[in-house]
Image (tube, coloured by chain):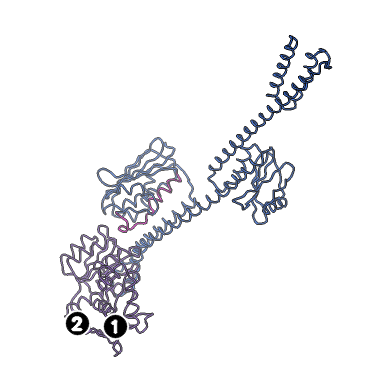
Chain colours: A purple, B blue
Amino acid sequence: MNRTARILLVDDDVSIQRAVAPLLRSRGYHVDVVSTGVEAVTAVAGGGLDLIVLDLGLPDLEGAEVCRQMRAHTRAPIVILSARSGEAEKVAALDIGADDYVTKPFGPEELLARIRVALRRVFEAEAPEVERVQVGDIIIDFARHRVVRADEEVRLTPKEFELLALLARNADRVLTHRAILKAIWGPNAVDQPEHLWVLMGQLRKKIEPDPGTPRYLLSEPWVGYRFVSNPD
Amino acid sequence: MGYDDLMTATAAMGLLIIVLLVAATAPLWVAVTTSFAAVLAFNFFFLPPVGTLTIADPQNWTALFALLVVSLVASNLSAVARARTREAEGRRDSLARLFDLSRDILLITDSQEANASLAGFISRRFDFDYVAICVPQGSEWLVFEAGPLRLTLDPAQLSAVYRQVEGGQQPSAGPPEVRFVPLRLGARPIGLLAAAGRPIEDATLDAVAGLTAIAIERAQFLDERKAADLARQSEALKSALLASLGHDLRTPLTAIKVAASNLQASWPDEQERRAQSDLILTEVDRLTRLFQNILEMARIDAGAITQDTRWVSPSEIIEAARSRVEPSLRGRVVQVQADADRLVKIDPRLTAAALSQLLENAAQYSPAGSAIEVHATVGADGLTIAVRDRGPGIPEADLPHVFERFYRGANVRDRRSGTGMGLAIARGVLAIERGRIAAENCSDGGVRFTIGVPAEVK
C-alpha cells in the first residue's frame, strides 16, 4: 500500500462507531465517521475517500438510495454492513453499485479482510488495465479468450468465458445475480436466474479442482457470486 | 203431511243440531254416545206411540235409522277434522320448537361447552325430563345430560344400541320410557340421542337428532378453525419476534464482538481500553433490557402478573419509571410536572413499567438532546400521565396500530433500532390495571402519549 487510505464509516449506531472506528485507525487507516445518509453523501462529494463502510438502516435514507447518490460522486468501493433481515435492501444496494457486504454480527477480522481486498482493487485499478491474470493455477487471457489451468488449455463456450471474464475483471467483488444476468443475457433475463445457475455449474466443472467445494468461483448465498483472486 | 209429521221432522233436525254441536267440540266417543241418546230420545218423545220405545209405523224406522246414520257420520267427520287440526297444530309446534332449537345451535360459539349446552337446549325446547347426547369415544361413552330427571345410562346398553344403529337397524327402546335415536352425519352414525319424559313423534325426534348431529359437526368445525387461527396467530407472532430480534440483537452483538476483540488486541492504550469496556457494558445493558421486555411480554401473555395496589404519589411513579430506563434517557432533559399533594391507590410497579416504556419510546424517536415532558394529573377517577416528545410524530396511517405487538411505523421500520414491543407492553401492563393508553400527534410537533389508570384518590 503506497499511501494511507481514507475510509468513511457511515453508521447511526454510536456503539458501532465507537468499536469500529478505533479498530480501523489502529490498522493505519484514516477514518471519518458520520451518522446519516445525507452527511455521508456530502462527505463523499467532498472527495478524497478511498473506501466507504456503509451501514444499511440509516435514519434518513434507504441504503440503496445512499449508494446511488454516492456513486454519482465516487468510484470508491462501498462495503455494506447489514443485518440479515435487510436482505432485500442489501441486494438492492449491491445492484446499484456497492462492492461487498458484511453481515452483522461480524468479527473485526472479517471486516478488515473485506476492506483490505476492496482497497487492493483500488490501488490495482490505478495501474493500467491487464491483458491477462493469473490466479492460483489458472491463467485467464482476456485478449485471446483463452483459459489455461495447470498448464492445460480449458475449452470454454463463449458464454462460459464471458461469465468467467466478468467475474475475474471484478475479482473479489460480489456481483449480484441480476447484475450478471443483465451483463451476459441482457436486461430481459434478469428474472431468470436458472440460466446463471446452469452456466455456473458448467463453468465450475471445467475450472474448479473440486466443483462441489469451489475455490475460485464462490457463491454468496441469495446474493450473487464472487471470484476470489487469492484462494488460500 | 200432517202437523204431527212436521213436529217430528223439526224435532229430528233439532236433535241433529245438538249431535253436531257435541261432535264439533267433544271427543268421538261422546259424540257417538250422544248420537245414540238422540236416537233413543227421538224414538221416546216424538215417534208414536209417544212415551215408549216401541215404533208402530214401520216408516218411522227409516226416519230413526237415518237420524242414527247422519249423527254417526257427522260425529266421525268432525272427529277426523279435529284430529287433523290437532295434528297440524302439533306439527306447527314441533316446527316452532325445532326452529328455536336451530337458533340456539347457531348461537353456540364455545365448542368446549357445545355438547352440554346442546342437551340443555333440546330438553328446554321440547320439555323433555331427560336428554342425553351420547358420543362414543373408543370403548367409553361421553354422555352429556340435561333435564330435571336423573337417569343412569348403562354404557353396555349404549354400545348394544349403537351396534344396531351401525348395522342399519332401528334402535330398540332403552330403559323404560327412554327413546334412542341415532345421530348421523350423512349415513355415518356419530352417536346417540336419548330422550325421556314426553311423548314425541318419531319424525320430530329424527329431526331433533339431525339438528343435533349438525350442531356437533359445527362445533367441531369451530374448534378446528379456532385452533387453526391460534396456530396462525402464534406463527405470525413468532416470526415477527424473530425478525425483530434478528434486527435488534445484531447491532449490540456486533459492537460487543468488535469491542471485545479490540480489548484482546495490543494496540489500544489505557484510555481506549476503558472506552471499549464501557462500550461492552452499555451494549450488555441494552441486551438486558431487550430480554426484560421479552420476559415481560411473556409474563403478560401467561397472565402471570397480578395487581398489587397501594397509596403512592404520582411523582414516585415517575421517579421509578425514570430509573428503570435510565441508560436510554442519558443526555435527555425530562421535564416533570406532577400533582405533589395528591395520592392515588394503584399498583406503582405496573404503572411505572408502562410509563417507562413511554419514556424510552420518546427518547428513541425524538432528536438527541430534545426535551421530554411528563405531565401527571390526579383527577376524581384516577391518575393521568402524559408523555410528550419533540420527535417527527407518527404518520396518521400508523397511529391506530402503534400499540400492536411488533408493529413498527413505516418511517422507522429498519431505521431505528427498536423491537416494536415497548408500546405493546405498556398497553398489556395497563390492561391489568384496567387502564387505557392513547397516542396523538401534537399540532406543534411531536407525539403525546397519555395513560389513564382508574384509582381511588385522596
Q: Does the magenta stretch include residue B431?
A: yes
**Residue A128 on image: x %, y %:** 16, 80
- At 79% from the left and 17% from the top, the residue drawn is B43
Identified by mark 1, the residue type is Leu
Location of the N terminus of chain A (image quadrant): bottom left
Residue A141 can be seen in this image: yes
- At 39% from the left and 46% from the top, the residue drawn is B317
- Residue situated in front as seen by the camera: B68 or A119: B68
Q: In this view, does B147 lie above or below B296?
A: above
- Residue situated in front as seen by the camera: B329 or B234: B234
**Residue B196 on image: x %, y %:** 69, 41
Q: In this view, does B64 lie above or below B230?
A: above
Q: What stretch is highlighted in magenta?
A: B411-433
Location of the C terminus of chain A (image quadrant): bottom left
**Residue B456 on image: x %, y %:** 44, 37
Image mark 2: chain: A
Residue A112 image-quadrant placement: bottom left
**Residue B391 on image: x %, y %:** 27, 50
Label 2 residue SS: loop
Q: For residue A156, which numbered disc appears in the image?
A: 1
Residue A211 image-quadrant placement: bottom left
Classify residue B151 as left or right of residue B100: right
Q: In this view, does A231 lie above or below B395?
A: below
Classify residue B229 as left or right of residue B188: left
Q: Where is mark 2, residue-wise?
A: A130
